[in-house]
Amino acid sequence: MTDTKTIGATSPAATRLRLRHFSKSLPMSLLRARESVMRHFRKSLREFGVTEQQWRVLRALSTKPQMEVAELARATFLLGPSLSRILVDLDQRGLILREPDPADLRRWMISLSPSGTELIDTVTPVSEAIYREISQRFGEDKLGQLQDLLAELEEAMAGIGNGGPNAPVD
Amino acid sequence: MTDTKTIGATSPAATRLRLRHFSKSLPMSLLRARESVMRHFRKSLREFGVTEQQWRVLRALSTKPQMEVAELARATFLLGPSLSRILVDLDQRGLILREPDPADLRRWMISLSPSGTELIDTVTPVSEAIYREISQRFGEDKLGQLQDLLAELEEAMAGIGNGGPNAPVD
DNA sequence: ATAAGAAATTTAACATGTTATCTAATTTGG
DNA sequence: CCAAATTAGATAACATGTTAAATTTCTTAT
């Protein structure tokens, strides 16, 4: 009932007008778009007992016989500490193998274990189906355009500051 | 020296070929693009003692005299628990005010405090400058295209499953 | 009016993001 | 050959993401 409109005048209108429309900022748009897509994947991954990040690791490993930790970090876009924890977990669950590199004892060679491979084979078809539906609903052409723009954006951003934590992947 | 080619045949080549090129998956592209942009903002935000998410909250608050928590969650795309913690922190630092809604004691009305407004006024010009440089380097036209595609993607995704945690914001 | 149900927010618990620091192993310069 | 600088990876510490459960308050049907 009581109209509270007269209070809350702490920040002047001038300040507000300077602000770009919030939900239209680029980082927010990217975040929301990603979430709208990931929501569909996360649900199915959860049923298989893997998180999004764990799946990224397993999937990256499925493209090569074995990888170093640093290589894996670049490929999955995970930071060292996150990856380190994830590798411990995946190792304990028997989904990966960690062998020391005899040439350099600081390095580990990571590879999929048989059961890790089995998991990949089980989950992949489901993931692909989801991806196909997304691609179909959004449109293959638009998807291509979007991918191109995102790559160009990344490239443009790389030029501004320095390299950053995770260097270009491909 | 023993040729290990015969082992490790758990996952046939067929499995590997089924996998889409990893770094080209849509979620990864979106994640990397966002990171490439956020890297520049995070650095400057840090100097002002606010995290990316805290800044999202303050910035959202700067667009209205006061907001409810749920409204703020939608606007900032933060989940309840994260927002709840952030509000406690911002309150303790005196950057926001929390007044109970007399009409419904479950609700809080959140607003910027004077010092919160002051912080906004200090940081905003810096943020805007960064945004301008990004926009200029990437190209205004491409930025517009990208924003459009991202919005369309979100819309398309909303149609697949259910609503999800954070409903459409605008 | 009152108990069951719904709603807004918080708390809890665990995983990841992020930065800084640490350890162990390797490389390099003298 | 040895000490300093580098490098790969792991740990630490704190903030957020994510889901589930708890709390408090409101709403509604009886």
Image: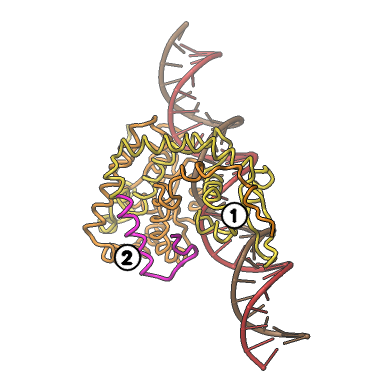
Chain colours: A yellow, B orange, C red, D brown
Up/down of C25 relative to A98, above or below? below
Quickly name the residue at label 2: B125
What's under tag 1, amino acid-wise?
Gln
Q: Nearer the viewer, mark 2 or mark 1?
A: 1
Provide the chain ID for the residue under circle 1: A
* Residue B25, position as x, y percentages in the image: 41, 47
- Provide residue D9's location: percent of width, then percent of height: 64, 61
Please report the bounds of the magenta region as a residue range. Answer: A146-170
Q: Main secondary structure of the magenta part?
A: helix
Residue sitting at x 58%, y 52%: A65
Q: What quarter of the picture does the N terminus of chain B occupy?
A: bottom right
* B150 is within the stretch colored magenta: no
| Residue A138 placement (x, y as % from top left) | 30, 39
> 10 Å neighbourhood of mark 1: few (<14), some, or many (≥20)?
some
Residue at image coords 60%, 57%: A81
Who is closer to the viewer here, A156 or B102? Answer: A156
Q: Nearer the viewer, residue A149 or B62?
A: A149
Q: CA distance from mark 2 to mark 1?
A: 48 Å
User: Considering the image in quadrants, where does the C terminus of chain B appear?
Assistant: top left
Chain to which the residue tagged by mark 2 belongs = B
Direction from residue B39 to residue B142 in the image, left or right: left
Q: Position of residue A157 (x, y in %)?
A: 36, 64
User: Height in image: A72 above or below A124?
Assistant: below
Name which residue type carries label 2: Pro
Q: Is residue A163 located in the magenta-colored stretch of the structure?
A: yes
Secondary structure of the residue carrying tag 2 is: helix
Q: Residues within 10 Å of mark 2 (few under 14, many from 20)?
A: few
Return the residue at label 1: A66
